[in-house]
Image: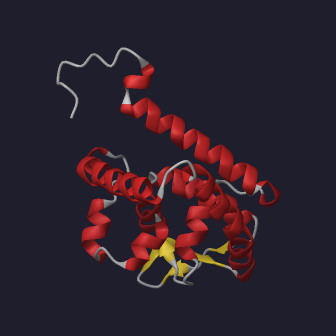
Amino acid sequence: MPDSDQDFEDLTDRPGHLIRRLHQIHVAMFLEECAAFNLTPVQFGVLTVLYDGKARDQVTIATMIGVDRNTAADVIRRLDRRDLLERPGDPADRRTKLAKITASGKELVDSVKPGMMRAQTRLVSPLSDAEYQQFMQLTLKLLEANDHSSRAPWKPFQDKVGNSDELRKIS
């Protein structure tokens, strides 16, 4: 744990800056590996959480992938325009539209998945197996401890559905 009076003067001393840079690098790797599909990591995340064929509302989707509702709504609109999703009404609430993956959406996920996996592997390839396990443990610890500060907290959703294997597949 750093001293409470640490000044974080240098960018390389700031965990937030390093995490943001690592995220930028990962997005660049994803876009490079998946360039042929014209899909962003967030769009792929939406399709991934809908891959099971269940129709979900945009708030649930936003929570599952850790984005705010407006971002989720925009991504869902874009995917709908590409016929990768359909938007059935919610039988329980006529005011709510759900999102459900189409056959084309599932085919796209299947096509993109190898590139996504290459991007993930490239990102962590400098780490040994032990370092990778430690990195994942520490990252999850930081996420859990700081989730309450997010504009799109994941913890309430986990509490609602349980810490299942389904959630681990999303991450």
- Coordinates of residue 77 in the picture (x, y in percent): 64, 60
Q: From this view, report whether residue 165 is shown above or below residue 128.
A: below
Residue 16 is at least partly visible in this image? yes
The residue lying toward the viewer, choosing from 61 and 4, is: 4
Left or right: 76, with 140 as reference point: right
The residue lying toward the viewer, choosing from 21 and 74, is: 21
Q: Residue at x 44, y 30 (%)?
A: 17
Left or right: 75, with 91 as reference point: right
Left or right: 155, with 49 as reference point: left
- Coordinates of residue 56 in the picture (x, y in percent): 48, 75
Snapshot colouring: secondary structure
Q: Quadrant of the N terminus?
A: top left
- Coordinates of residue 38 in the picture (x, y in percent): 77, 56
The residue lying toward the viewer, choosing from 110 and 43, is: 110
Q: From this view, report whether residue 127 is shown above or below residue 7.
A: below
| Residue lying at the far left of the rendered structure | 4
| Residue lying at the far right of the rendered structure | 36
Left or right: 160, with 102 as reference point: left
- Coordinates of residue 15 in the picture (x, y in percent): 37, 33
